[in-house]
Image (cartoon, rainbow, N blue to C red):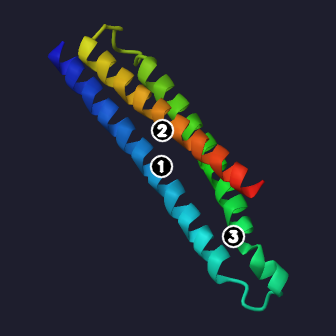
């Protein structure tokens, strides 16, 4: 039982690390795109330059919605992998792992809500 618990804890740790890496990759990519939008366009007309912040907000909103959907899909895949037992293991209930997974899912849901609120605020600013 201890061996199974250790294996499950190791698997949960690996999956959590994968989720963190995916999230950080999405954030790095969006920051690079934002910088390109801000610093490009020296030869643009005055009207185009004047609305650059709106283009930046629109791009940021698209990036947030894209990364949000990618993270949701990643979370769903990781949850399925955690719930599906290996073919050689019996399904056992482990309260510690269940509480840990519940806490992590709650944290991911809270992050999802915050991202949704940020998207709503950005969309209100653009409108």
Q: Nearer the viewer, mark 2 or mark 3?
A: 3
Tags 1 and 3 in contact by the CB under 8 Å rule?
no
Which residue is rendered at x = 38% and y = 36% of the image? 15
Report the number of numbered marks: 3
Residue 23, labelled with which disc? 1
Residue 53, labelled with which disc? 3
Say whether residue 45 is left or right of residue 62.
Answer: right
Say whether residue 33 is left or right of residue 78.
Answer: right
Q: Nearer the viewer, mark 1 or mark 2?
A: 2
**Pointer 2 or 3: first along the chain:** 3
**Looking at the image, which is closer to me, 118 or 31?**
118
| Other residues around mark 1 within 10 Å, as few (<14) / some (14–19) / many (≥20) | some
Say whether residue 52 is left or right of residue 11.
Answer: right
Q: Residue furthest bottom?
A: 43
Residue 10, labelled with which disc? none
Q: Which residue is tagged 2? A: 111
**Pointer 1 or 2: first along the chain:** 1
Residue 13: give x, y in percent of width and height.
30, 36
Which residue is rendered at x = 62% and y = 69% of the image? 33
Q: Secondary structure at mark 2?
A: helix
Write down the quadrant of residue 39 in the picture. bottom right
**Measured Cα–Cα span from mark 1 to mark 2:** 11 Å
Q: Is residue 37 above or below residue 119?
A: below
Which residue is rendered at x = 24% and y = 17% of the image? 96
Q: Residue furthest left?
A: 2
């Amino acid at each position: 039982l201890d061996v199974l618990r250790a294996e499950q804890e190791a698997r949960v740790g690996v999956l959590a690390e994968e989720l963190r890496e995916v999230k950080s990759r999405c954030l790095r990519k969006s920051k690079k795109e934002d910088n390109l939008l801000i610093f490009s366009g020296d030869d643009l007309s005055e009207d185009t330059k004047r609305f650059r912040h709106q283009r930046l907000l629109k791009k940021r909103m698209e990036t947030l919605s894209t990364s949000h959907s990618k993270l949701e899909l990643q979370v769903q895949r990781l949850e399925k992998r955690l719930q599906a037992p290996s073919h050689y293991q019996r399904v056992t209930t482990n309260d510690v792992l269940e509480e840990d997974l519940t806490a992590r899912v709650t944290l991911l849901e809270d992050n999802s809500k915050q991202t949704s609120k940020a998207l709503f605020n950005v969309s209100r600013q653009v409108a």
